[in-house]
Image (tube, grey):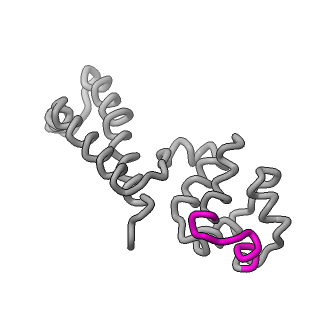
Amino acid sequence: MPQCERNIYKTARQAKGLTQESAAEKLGISETSLRAYESGDRVPPVEVVDLMVIAYDSQLLGIQHLRASAEMARSILPEVQALPLSEAVLQLLNRVYAFADNHRDRQLMAIAADGCIDEDEQPLFLQIVEHDLQEIIEAAMAVRYASGRHA
């Protein structure tokens, strides 16, 4: 796991406004263990991350942990940036408008109209799904987990 990703635990704790001492108590672990997780010396077990997600009120931490710890998760879960709500919303709208402005919506409808993807349609379909829609999904998830968002 790259060093920057190991700090996700510390970032989530600090965003919740908890000290290491209070967080360790809430999690039922030692401060030494928490320091090891936050310094990147050890990766917390899934059970501890589950508790962190709850204690820190951070589903984003769960996604970041999965992406950082499992190759399979990196191929399934999009990378989600922790952004202020206003910035996340603007990014999402920009990507949706670009999708429409570039007529990707119409191209996707044309590809799907007959219920199958022909060999000549395959490259465009993959480009739309793997690039355009992926960007929209990432931006939508950034809105979902944006800082400053209230449930």
Q: Is residue 49 magenta?
A: no
User: In the rendered view, would you say 107 is above or below 27?
Assistant: above
Q: Is residue 77 above or below residue 15?
A: above
Instruction: Identify the residue at image location x=82%, y=51%.
Output: 41
Q: Which residues are the magenta region?
A: 14-25
Left or right: 150, with 68 as reference point? left
Can residue 15 be found in the magenta stretch? Answer: yes
Q: Position of residue 79 (x, y in %)?
A: 49, 45
Observer-nearest of 115 and 9 = 9
Q: Is residue 149 left or right of residue 26?
A: left
Q: Is residue 91 above or below residue 46?
A: above
Q: Identify the main secondary structure in magenta.
A: helix
> Quick one: 122 or 47, which is closer to the camera?
47
The quarter of the picture where residue 98 lies is top left
Reply above or below: 77 against 27. above
* Residue 91 position in % (x across, y down): 32, 44
Left or right relative to 120: residue 56: right
Q: Position of residue 55 (x, y in %)?
A: 61, 74
Q: Residue at x 29, y 47 (%)?
A: 90
